[in-house]
Image (cartoon, grey):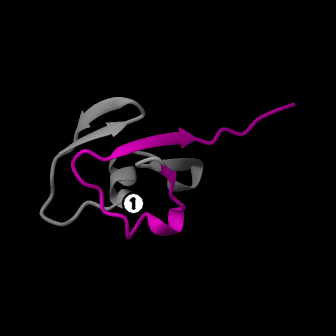
Amino acid sequence: MRLTINGEEKAIEPSKNPLTLSKLIEQLGHHPRLIVVEFNGAILPPDKWEQQNVEDGDTLEIVTIVGGGS
């Protein structure tokens, strides 16, 4: 399966079960509470990740939330 993640095309091994966005985020090593995900042009809230299947050709932008300041 080919996905575009943060502007880069990536090959993801297909699995027997449908790949959900939640599983993909885990597979990519992201902590779900520290990111925002744009899925095919729309920001998808975390409570929808488990139901959202990821398919060949999908586009994701994953933004990491960073705290800080002075």
Judge whether residue 63 is colored magenta. Answer: yes
Extreme residue in the front direction = 41
Q: How many numbered marks have been drawn onto this rendered protein structure? A: 1
Quarter of the image for residue 20 reads: bottom left
Left-right relation of 64 to 70: left
Left-right relation of 21 to 13: right
Residue extent of the magenta highlight:
42-70
Residue wearing tag 1? 22
The amino acid pointed to by label 1 is Ser
- Name the residue nearer the viewer: 9 or 33: 9
- Report x, y in % for residue 12: 21, 43
Question: Residue at the location (38% across, 70% down)?
Answer: 51
- Report x, y in % for residue 2: 21, 41
Q: Is residue 54 above or below residue 3?
A: below
- Report x, y in % for residue 69: 82, 32
Extreme residue in the left direction = 16
Question: Residue at the location (30% across, 62% down)?
Answer: 53
- Main SS, magenta residues: loop
Judge whether residue 48 is colored magenta. Answer: yes
